[in-house]
């Protein structure tokens, strides 16, 4: 793999910059690189954080010098290939749009000259690729929002956006995994839990998964919410077939 | 070292919680790729030293105490150490030594007075505190429902084992926390996004710590650090000590409770051995930044590791050397 640049993040981190346009293709390359990091278990590496066009690796400088980790990662990157990635899931997120759960749906509709139904249809009619995770535990950064429903962030962010809120922030769609301040236009809410530190696997998503929103009624919302509470709800997931696998 | 692990027992009754008292260890690593904030001690050096002086693993959890300390009643015999900011610790109303292990008896009363220097101090207990291990760490991150701040009437549990009292650092080895500091930094990944004048302003001016300085980050007041063309980047990982500059040109040093990722340009990263200086800096404090290269920063890191290892071997080793002189036989650079 060519066109990568190494940059130090102080004495305990290194940033691997991929000099390429952000795209689902680059995302696969980054996932392949991370898979190699996981397999190779290079001594002294603590963890790594994939992002849109970079991977940051944290390490212990008494076990690996900056020079040594550059060499290790450079070798690793030459083996990374888009074909060698782990299979990922398409995850279906039941979402109650509008009303109290999505108080900015009207605003999103009006500012895009659409009806509320058109916004819902548009938002739930497509897959969103998770490029990376960050901001909050279990929070996915997704790509793929249709230009026709993009809406600028709120001028002053809300102090408390409830967990599970689904929103549009500029050119991105978001789901808040925890209650937090936030500037997104909230169009709906899911009763599904995205992060639960008491579970063996606390995270619903990981980078490379795709999310599909499914519009539900209030009754369905309550039923799912109840099922989530008593632990009987299972989020629908399916392994997705990758269009870019040809080469 | 804990040869025989003790039973869990109540250690302290909290009479007053203090300004902000939390359980912290060296942080929750391994889950940043899922957005999980690292948390952990703001001053990792003070925390590790506090642990080693009572014979703990150096990554054991301590109480991180901020500015106004708590009032605690001792419920069972324990060996503790207090390292970090001098917040005037007292036992039964008498000044307690810092950077040295102390023996507590049942019904002793631990209090803190006026802050003398620094912001955060660490109280370790031989055997360690009992706190749920969530994703590999005892560190509190209340925002995500992981642990909680220490509150009035809480009982704090631990695994107290008898340690050695009187084991301490030499006077010359104790860090002095100042209100004006020079922080050594490695240049950040987005240097080319700043104007030459912006970079000059960063390195050649004094920066003031604003009142917005907490576990998440320290906002500074500076002569504006201008960007060539906006401050937005494709979001990426933020290291401990990363210096972010949003569009207003005012830098923020990102600390233990920082978000894992962010979308603003970063001009520098404070080197590991200087993070304590930030963690112990009060609002109104002054900062100058000086560039070092990554090799120099790593050399300093390794020296710090060496120092901590020496403390560890010392505390584990010769029991006859304990006493007021502490490490008198050790060479100090």
Image (cartoon, helix red, strand yellow):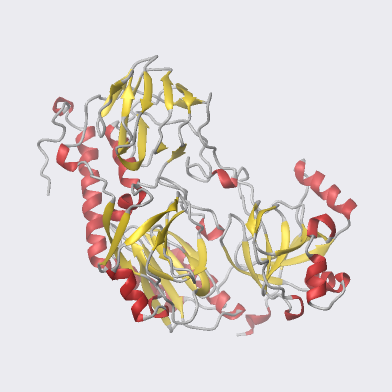
- Say which of A77 and A23 sits in front: A23
Q: Residue at x 48, y 65 (%)?
A: B237
Residue B73 x, y percent position in the rendering: 42, 19
Confirm whether residue A163 shows in the render.
yes
Could you tell whether B234 is left or right of B113 in the image? Answer: right
Q: List x then y, in percent, for residue B187.
A: 33, 70
Q: Position of residue B136 (x, y in %)?
A: 49, 44
Give x and y (percent) for residue B11: 43, 22
Quarter of the image with the N terminus of chain A is bottom left
Name which residue lies at 44% across and 70% down: B249
Residue situated in front as seen by the camera: B245 or B27: B245
* Quarter-of-image position of residue A56: bottom left
Q: Quadrant of the C terminus of chain A?
A: bottom right
**Quadrant in the rendering for residue A198:** top right
Q: Is residue A232 left or right of residue B232?
A: right
- Going 14% across and 28% down the picture, which residue do you hit? B321
Whether residue A44 is visible, yes or no, is no
């Amino acid at each position: 793999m060519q066109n990568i640049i190494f940059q130090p993040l102080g004495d305990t981190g290194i940033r691997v910059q991929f000099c390429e346009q952000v795209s689902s293709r680059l995302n696969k390359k980054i996932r392949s690189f991370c898979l190699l990091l996981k397999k190779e278990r290079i001594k002294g590496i603590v963890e790594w954080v994939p992002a849109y066009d970079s991977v940051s690796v944290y390490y212990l400088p008494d076990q690996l010098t900056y020079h040594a980790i550059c060499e290790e990662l450079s070798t690793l990157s030459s083996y990374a290939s888009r074909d060698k990635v782990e299979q990922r899931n398409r995850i279906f997120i039941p979402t109650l749009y509008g009303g109290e759960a999505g108080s900015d749906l009207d605003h999103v509709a009006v500012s895009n000259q659409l009806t509320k139904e058109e916004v819902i249809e548009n938002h739930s009619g497509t897959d969103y690729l998770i490029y990376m995770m960050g901001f909050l535990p279990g929070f996915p950064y997704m790509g793929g929002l249709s230009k026709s429903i993009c809406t600028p962030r709120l001028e002053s962010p809300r102090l408390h956006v409830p967990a599970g809120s689904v929103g549009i922030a500029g050119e991105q769609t978001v789901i808040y995994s925890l209650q937090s301040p936030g500037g997104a236009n909230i169009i709906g809410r899911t009763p599904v839990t995205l992060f639960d530190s008491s579970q063996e696997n606390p995270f619903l998503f990981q980078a490379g998964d795709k999310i599909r929103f499914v519009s539900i009624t209030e009754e369905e919302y309550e039923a799912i919410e109840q099922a989530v509470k008593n632990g009987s709800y299972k989020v629908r997931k399916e392994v997705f077939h990758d269009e870019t696998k040809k080469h | 070292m804990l040869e025989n692990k003790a039973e869990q027992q109540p250690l302290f009754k909290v009479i007053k919680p203090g300004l902000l008292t939390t359980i912290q260890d060296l942080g929750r690593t391994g889950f940043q790729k899922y957005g999980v904030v690292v948390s952990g001690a703001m001053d990792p050096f003070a925390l590790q030293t506090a642990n080693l002086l009572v014979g703990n693993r150096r990554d054991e959890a301590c109480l991180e105490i901020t500015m106004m300390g708590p009032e605690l009643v001792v419920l069972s015999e324990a060996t503790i150490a207090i390292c970090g900011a001098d917040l005037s610790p007292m036992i039964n109303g008498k000044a307690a030594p810092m950077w040295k292990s102390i023996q507590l008896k049942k019904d002793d009363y631990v209090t803190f007075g006026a802050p003398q220097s620094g912001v955060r101090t660490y109280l370790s207990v031989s055997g360690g505190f009992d706190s749920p291990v969530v994703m590999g760490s005892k560190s509190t991150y209340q925002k995500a429902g992981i642990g909680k701040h220490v509150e009035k009437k809480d009982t704090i549990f631990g695994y107290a084992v008898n340690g050695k009292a009187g084991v301490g650092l030499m006077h010359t080895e104790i860090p002095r926390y100042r209100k004006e500091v020079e922080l050594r930094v490695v240049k950040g990944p987005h240097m080319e996004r700043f104007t030459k004048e912006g970079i000059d302003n960063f390195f050649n001016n004094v920066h003031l710590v604003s009142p917005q300085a907490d576990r998440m980050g320290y906002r500074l007041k500076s002569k504006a650090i201008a960007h060539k063309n906006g401050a937005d980047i494709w979001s990426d990982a933020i290291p401990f000590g990363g210096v972010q500059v949003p569009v207003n040109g005012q830098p923020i040093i990102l600390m233990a409770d920082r978000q894992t990722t962010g979308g603003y340009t970063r001009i520098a990263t404070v080197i590991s051995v200087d993070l304590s200086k930030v963690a112990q800096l009060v609002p109104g404090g002054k900062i100058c930044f000086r560039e070092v290269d990554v090799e120099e920063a790593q050399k300093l890191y390794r020296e710090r590791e060496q120092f901590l290892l020496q403390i560890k071997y010392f505390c584990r080793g010769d029991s006859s050397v304990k006493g007021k002189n502490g490490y008198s036989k050790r060479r100090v650079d």
